[in-house]
Image: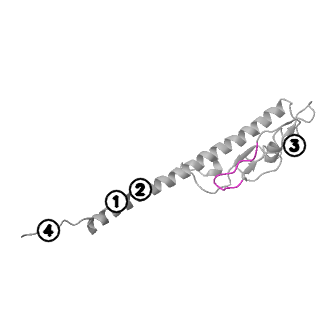
Amino acid sequence: MILAPRRSRGFSLVELVIVCACILILTAMIVPVTRFGLVRQKEMELRAALRGIRTAIDDFKRSSDQGLIPVELDTEGYPKTLDKLVEGVELVGQIKKKKRFLRKIPIDPMTGKAEWGLRSYQDDPGGRSWGRQNVYDVYSLSPLTGLDKTKYKDW
């Protein structure tokens, strides 16, 4: 009686090595895409935060130009600090009524802090020093460069 050889069950070592190599290659392709996506998400958050603060500053200026809020000396109608946008300002002609422009100062997603670079209306447009007269503009304090090859502080 001749016995037929038994078929071995399972995978050979070569098959396992090939499968592992394929998984490693696919993983290596996913990691850069994921990193790119995370950076892109942070950049979108930064743009939204800058837009929100700048809109609040513009609303403050518009309200002061219309005479709805009192104007402090040497501020040109802009807020003295970012905190002034959160605290609010008493409305002219109304008792104990404040207008707030921001709920809170947003966090800079690139630095992870609620700290922003500030510019006064009187400051040099390209300068990075704040004259402390008012808050005319904000920028990120991050030294990093964005995906579009511009520095975040220039946004």
Kind of residue sitting beneath label 1? Cys
Going by the numbered disc 2, the residue's amino acid type is Met
State how far apart marks 2 and 3 are (Cα): 56 Å
User: Principal SS element in the magenta part?
Assistant: loop
In the foreground, 29 or 79:
29
Residue nearest the viewer, comparing 61 with 8 = 8
Residue interval drawn in magenta: 103-113
Q: Amino acid at mark 4?
A: Pro
Front disc: 1 or 4: 4
Q: Quadrant of the N terminus?
A: bottom left
Of the numbered discs 4 and 3, the one sitting upstream in the chain is: 4
- Asked whether, in this view, residue 31 is left or right of residue 112, the answer is left
First in sequence: mark 2 vs mark 3: 2
Query: Considering the numbered disc 2 on the image, is that residue within a helix, a strand or a loop?
Result: helix
Q: Mark 4 sits on what residue?
A: 5
Mark 2 vs mark 1, CA separation in Å? 11 Å
Q: Nearer the viewer, residue 122 or 2?
A: 2
Residue 45 seen anywhere in this rendered image of the structure: yes
- Packing grade of label 2 (10 A; few <14, some 14-19, many >=20) is few
Read off the residue under disc 3: 74
How far apart are the alpha carbons under marks 1 and 3?
Answer: 66 Å
Residue at 69%, 51% (x, y): give it: 107
Q: Which residue is mark 2?
A: 29
- Circle 4/circle 3 CB separation < 8 Å: no
Mark number, residue 22: 1
- Numbered tag placed on residue 38 in the rendering: none
Residue 155 visible within the image: no
Three-letter code for the amino acid on which mark 3 is drawn: Asp
Give the mark nearer the N terminus: 1 vs 4: 4
Whichever of callouts 1 and 3 sits on the residue coming sooner in the sequence is 1
Q: Is residue 2 left or right of residue 68?
A: left
